[in-house]
Amino acid sequence: QKEVEQNSGPLSVPEGAIASLNCTYSDRVSQSFFWYRQYSGKSPELIMSIYSNGDKEDGRFTAQLNKASQYVSLLIRDSQPSDSATYLCAVKGGGSEKLVFGKGMKLTVNP
Amino acid sequence: NAGVMQNPRHLVRRRGQEARLRCSPMKGHSHVYWYRQLPEEGLKFMVYLQKENIIDESGMPKERFSAEFPKEGPSILRIQQVVRGDSAAYFCASSPDRDGQPQHFGDGTRLSIL
C-alpha cells in the first residue's frame, strides 16, 4: 500500500516569509512527484513537478527531491496572502499511472 | 477553453437514484483519471481509462460504480443506487500519452445525496 505523508498542519506564516511544506512517501520505486494547490471549494492546480534528485525552481516556488530519504518538499518564498490554500503532495510510479495524494497541508499567509 | 471539462458542476440526487458524471479531457490528452474527495479528506484515485479501455480500476468500489471512456464522447462515471456516503467532490484529470506527464484537473462535480 503506497502512502504519502504530509506534515500535520495548519501552517501559518507572515506575508513575505518563506513557507516550507514537506512530504514523505513509502514506495521506493516512485518516479514522479507533484505539488498541487487547492483553494477552498476549487479543483487541484498543478504548481510544480519534479522527477530527479535536487532542486527545481519556478518563480517563487522551489521543489526539492531526495529519493534516498524518500522526501520531497516545497518552498514558497516571499509568501503572499494569495498563497493561502491547501497544498497537496502527489506521487506516481512503480508501474502505475495513478497519483497517490497526501492529505494536504493548509497554509495561511497573514498580511 | 482547452482545459478538462466536467459537468455538471453540482448534482443533487435522492438515495437510490443514479448519478452520471461527465468528463472531457484536455485537447491532445488521451488518458483520463477519476478521483474522489470526501469532506476534509485527501484525493483518492478511483479509475484510469484510455479510449475504450479501463487500465486500472483498483480504486473503484466493487459495487454500484462504473466508468467508461468511449471512442466518441466524454468519459462517464456512473454511480447506481446512490447512498449518502457517495456525497463528495468527484474530480476528473487528464494527461497526454507520454510517461510521467502531470495530470491536469477539471473543476469537479459536487455530488450531494438527499
Image (spheres, coloured by chain):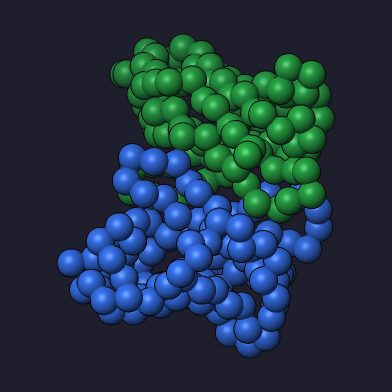
Residue at the (61%, 58%) spot, across then down: B58
| Residue found at the very far bottom of the displayed protein | B72
Residue A64, by quadrant, is top right
Which chain is drawn using green? Answer: A
Front in this rendered view, residue A108 or B88: B88
| Residue found at the very far left of the displayed protein | B114
The mark tally for this picture is 0
Find chain B in the image and tell me its colour.
blue
Residue A111 seen from this side: yes
Front in this rendered view, residue A110 or B105: B105
Residue at the (28%, 79%) spot, across then down: B17
Quarter of the figure with the C terminus of chain A: top left
Residue A9: horizontal and vertical position, in percent? 39, 21
Residue A51: horizontal and vertical position, in percent? 78, 35
Q: Is residue B73 above or below residue A18?
A: below
Quarter of the figure with the N terminus of chain A: top right
Q: Is residue B12 above or below residue A21?
A: below
Front in this rendered view, residue A63 or B11: B11
Residue A33, by quadrant, is top right
Q: Is residue A101 above or below residue A42?
A: above
| Residue found at the very far front of the displayed protein | B62
Residue A50 seen from this side: no
Front in this rendered view, residue B30 or B80: B80
Residue B67: horizontal and vertical position, in percent? 54, 74
Residue A101: horizontal and vertical position, in percent? 55, 40
Residue at the (43%, 72%) spot, across then down: B64
Q: Is residue A80 above or below residue A40?
A: above
